[in-house]
Image: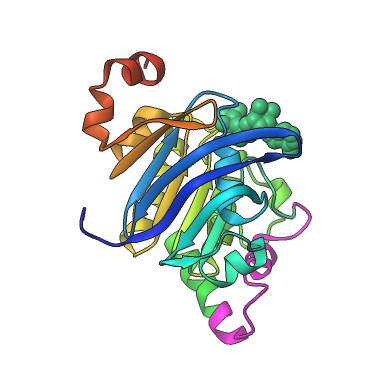
């Protein structure tokens, strides 16, 4: 696995919001086929990192490469077209629309209607809750069910790389387990995953590699076993259960 090529690489990336600089000289690599976790305190810059990769926030310096190609200055739409999808923090689906309609929206850049319909059928078989609630407005689903819809929407474009921001926030333990299982399953079917999680221990348990972000910079990185045995990482992020 360690010899797989990098699907994503950030080289000395700086980014932020106007005058506010958040990411400071971030360099990192994600290997094809891996699940990579990014952990860190509130405000460390985890969401900003994903937004910068997806193109919602543009880097002020540095370079971003995807599959070896420079994608530093791309829009989110271009990111979607080359195979990067993004599951943002919180609920961002269309609550008045049904599960089916939300999934159709997720495929908005595809024009192969029949394949899209088959894809929706396949996702509904894979996530039974989607089948059960297929014609229900998403706004009437529970938080955990809405999170499943979010993930399914991001899968509609069959991404090579999926960026997932805190998918388990506010979920009951049983659903947390379910979301982690789904992320593993997505990864096993060939999608590389960058996962931002508050639930650091659980995230590292399913990851091949991890990064610890502090004040917008990579403070530690390594394989999960290495990070879990690092005293500073342990005390700051893994100490309490
Ligand atoms: N749209 C914005 N405009 C200005 N500042 C922002 C914006 N979004 C985030 N910030 C600031 O950028 C910093 C990093 O925020 P970010 O959302 O990336 O943190 P995070 O690690 O995802 O935190 P959390 O764990 O709370 O989600 C914070 O200081 C935050 O206040
Ligand atoms: Mg965040």
Residue 186 relative to residue 129: left or right: left
Snapshot quadrant of residue 219: top left
The spot of residue 72 in percent (x, y) is 57, 59
Q: Is residue 162 above or below residue 91?
A: below
Give yes or no for residue 93 being in the magenta stretch: no
Image point 69% across, 53% down: which residue? Answer: 93
Camera-side residue of 149 and 83:
83
Q: Position of residue 3 (x, y in %)?
A: 20, 58
In the drawing, does residue 208 fall left or right of residue 199? left
Q: Report the coloring of the rendering.
A: rainbow
Closer to the camera, 190 or 102? 190
User: Is residue 170 among the parts visible in the rendering?
Assistant: no
Q: Foreground: 223 or 69? A: 69
Whether residue 126 appears in this view of the structure is yes
The C terminus: image quadrant = top left
- The number of numbered badges drawn on the structure is 0
| Residue occupying the far right of the picture | 96
Residue drawn at x 51%, y 65% is 70
Give the extent of the magenta segment.
Answer: 95-116
Q: Is residue 197 left or right of residue 92?
A: left
Residue 226 lies, in percent from the top left, at 22, 30
Residue 218, given in percent of the width and then of the height, sits at: 43, 33
Q: Is residue 234 above or below residue 174?
A: above
Is residue 171 depicted above or below 161 in this figure?
Answer: above
Q: Residue at x 69, y 49 (%)?
A: 92
15 is higher (above) or lower (below) than 172:
below
Q: Is residue 59 left or right of residue 218?
A: right
Residue at (43% x, 29% y) in the render: 199
> Looking at the rendering, which quadrant does residue 120 occupy?
bottom right
């Amino acid at each position: 696995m360690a010899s797989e090529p990098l699907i994503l690489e950030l080289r000395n990336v700086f980014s932020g919001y106007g005058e506010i600089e958040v990411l400071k000289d971030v360099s990192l690599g994600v290997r094809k086929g891996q699940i990579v976790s990014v952990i860190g305190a509130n405000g460390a810059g985890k969401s900003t990192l994903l937004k910068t990769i997806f193109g919602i926030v543009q880097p002020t310096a540095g370079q971003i490469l995807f599959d070896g190609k420079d994608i530093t200055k791309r829009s989110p739409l271009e990111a979607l077209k080359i195979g990067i999808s993004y599951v943002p923090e919180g609920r961002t689906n269309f609550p008045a629309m049904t599960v089916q309609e939300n999934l159709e929206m997720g495929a908005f850049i595809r024009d192969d209607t029949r394949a899209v319909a088959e894809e929706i059928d396949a996702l509904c078989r894979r996530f039974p809750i989607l089948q059960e609630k297929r014609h229900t407005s998403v706004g009437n689903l529970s938080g955990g069910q809405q999170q499943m819809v979010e993930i399914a929407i991001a899968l509609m474009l069959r991404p090579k790389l999926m960026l997932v921001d805190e998918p388990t926030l506010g979920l009951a333990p049983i659903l947390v387990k379910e979301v982690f299982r789904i992320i593993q399953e997505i990864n096993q079917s060939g999608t590389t995953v960058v996962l931002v999680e508050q639930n650091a221990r659980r995230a590292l348990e399913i990851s091949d590699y991890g990064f610890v972000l502090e004040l917008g910079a990579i403070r530690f990185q390594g394989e999960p076993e290495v990070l879990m045995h690092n005293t500073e990482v342990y005390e700051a992020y893994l100490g309490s259960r």
